[in-house]
Image (cartoon, grey):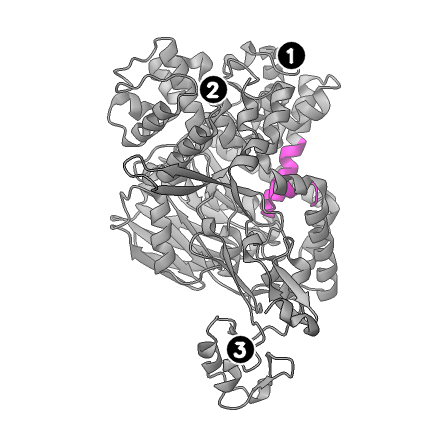
Amino acid sequence: MDRVLYIDLTKKRFWVERRADLFERYIGGTGVAIQLLKENCSDGVDPLSPDNPIIFAVGPLTGVFPMASKTIAMFKSPHTGNLGESHAGGRSAIAIRMAGYGAIVIKGASASPIYVSIHGDKVFFRDASALWGMRSAFTVGRIIRENERGAGLRTIMRIGRAGERLVSYACVTTETYRHFGRLGLGAVFGSKKLKAVVVAGKRSIPVSNKRGYRELYDEIYKSAVESPVMKKYHDLGTPENVLPLNKFGGLPTRNLKEASFEEAEKISGERFARDYLGRRLACSHCPVGCIHIAALREPYEDEPYFYKTSMISYDYEPIYALGSMIGGSDPEGLLKLMDKIETLGLDAMTTGVVLAWATEAQEKGLISEEDTMGIKLSWGDYPSYISFVDLIVNAPNDFFKAVARGVEYASDIYGGKDFALAFGGNEMPGYHTGPGAHIGFLMGSRHSHLDCAGYSLDQKVLVKERLSPCEIAKRLLDEERWRQILSSLAICFFARGIYKPNVVCRALSLVGFEFSEDDLRRIGAEIHKAKYRFKIDNGFSLKTIRIPKRILETSSPIGMLDERAIREALDCVWREVV
Amino acid sequence: MRLAVVDTERCVGCQSCMFACARRFGEAGLAKTCIGVRSVGGMERGFVVVVCRGCEDPPCARVCPTGALKVKSEGGVFLKPDECIGCGYCKEACPIGAVFWDDETNKPMICSHCGYCANYCPHGVLEVFREEERHSYG
């Protein structure tokens, strides 16, 4: 577990270092990754330079207990210019652990396109010139799949053309349908001429008490397959949230001009399941299987009885970003746009918010049809959006070069700042549920809804009782600190209800870590602090963070948001973290 | 007891069965697993579940030069490790790829049809049958 694989793309060298010092103190995943990032990325490094490292880390429970199947990626984000952290599942975590590593550090840059193939102790640098510039990321996956061994025991992380062309919100795709989606890891790959990373392996992991291991395994497995919460993820999947959030009045619609969507039913989890669901998939070592794949059958226009069937993954966040947020209610249009985004390798959430901002900016006359090269955007018009997305990647003029860096940057140039929905430079997730959600986006160390689940505080607590801004901040901070432990164990946040503190302590004990619940909470706070230290050292401040005016203009289910209260909450967080 | 793959279309690729197989020996990880799940060629097309189907006249045993693989009366094989020289002919002979390899001992690993993995198949891909039900799954 304490083996860290270093790969230098410039010199085409690799070596292993034992870092028990890090794993014993910070567990794994996020905790170890932030330390490795600090060691390998000095302040002020250009995110697209060879000096920006890519860190992947897994946890001590990965491959031992179910649902500890996330890989934590850390890097400096080319999108925000600050801390980049993104999590993905698929087969990535199991493959890294089974190849014999707790973490991988990729440094330098190659002069020509390559992909790296890690098979246990061996690392191969393979030429990727023939894959560079390939139109579809799906095809790239297919080719590497056929070239490499280890089927079923490997991960293939790859980028599309968006990453090659350094779109700052390009993603890295793993196993076709899972993503290191947010904050632009794909562009960091692209800047290193790194088309893909393959990891494969197979090994045993020792546990101290075989009987105790099997018993605790059964307990966790049973709660995973029997709990109603996990059933929800398996049945309709995350899109089950579309209708409840809409009813609640927290579904961002048309660039958050509204917070409910009159046509939500057409893009609901129920509707997708009924009309399109073609297959469900799981990450390795997760019995839940929350991944939902739509089958979209389309006729070719030039020849009768000629069809293609595309298999397209859908989830709540892409449905929000590429549905309600852009006023889109045609599920087929939504799926086609999703497919286009997958083909290019973009982050679906940021792309949707960019489209929403551009639509409103054009509506308000801030950008012309000349800027958009003749595209007239209007809410819900999928054919225009699909053409627009191609242009984001091709970036043929200044306007598209600007939107290829997100709404914060584009609105610096074209105006429309008040409705540029980014927090700390990262585009908004699909929750306008109340102050909890927005304070969470602002203060979260990744500016993600998953940092501290403010949307959950809104729906479970703030609907019933008032909390002072500082109390809200404190609750969110507590949640985010605990989540540092979950992501250091590389446990999927969907399983947070199963991995309660005492379960985590027992599981860790079986793999040789003796921590009390208090120890874990202390370590969680320490990891959170380390992440914030990195952010501050790279110029981040909660004092000056921009609050998009739009969130104050559209009523939330908890009422209108108050900027002063939000600032007060952020001040409380700031005092805690500096 | 006989393990059977009853419907691969229901497989979500979670690989819980593979981890279960290794856990029989109280081990975590995948080194000791005798069952394999991989995609058909991209997860969008579903999965292949590879495990010994307990042939009555198993080719793996037929090619074993030392007789280390013994045929069981109900079909399938078991390994007498002391007699195995690790030549790997059995692995080559199995057309479905169900002879797995233990790199530590350099000997084959083949499913014993204990059925432990089926307890951890959440979606009804694997099932355990009694011998007299054999006709029903073929």
Mark 1 vs mark 3: tell me if same chain: no
Callout 1: SS: loop
Residue A386, given in percent of the width and then of the height, sits at: 35, 28
Circle 3 crowding by C-alpha within 10 Å: few under 14, some 14–19, many from 20: many
Pointer 3 chain: B
Q: Is residue A170 visible?
A: no
The region drawn magenta spans A478-498
**Residue wearing tag 2:** A327
Q: What's the residue at 72%, 44% (across, down)?
A: A227
Residue A58, given in percent of the width and then of the height, sits at: 54, 50
Q: Main secondary structure of the magenta part?
A: helix
* Relative to A285, residue A85 above or below: above
How far apart are the alpha carbons under marks 1 and 2? 23 Å
Circle 2 crowding by C-alpha within 10 Å: few under 14, some 14–19, many from 20: many
Decide which of B108, A499 is in the foreground and name it. B108
**Residue wearing tag 1:** A559
* Relative to A561, residue A113 above or below: below
* Relative to A510, residue A461 above or below: above
Circle 1 crowding by C-alpha within 10 Å: few under 14, some 14–19, many from 20: few
As drawn, the label of residue B108 is 3
Mark 1 vs mark 2: tell me if same chain: yes
Give the mark nearer the N terminus: 1 vs 2: 2
How far apart are the alpha carbons under marks 1 and 3? 66 Å
Instruction: Residue type at mark 2: give it.
Output: Gly
Pointer 1 chain: A
Q: Which quadrant holds residue B125?
A: bottom right
Q: What's the residue at 44%, 77% (across, down)?
A: B92
Callout 3: SS: strand
Q: Is residue A391 visible?
A: yes
* Relative to A447, residue A177 above or below: below
Instruction: Residue type at mark 3: give it.
Output: Pro
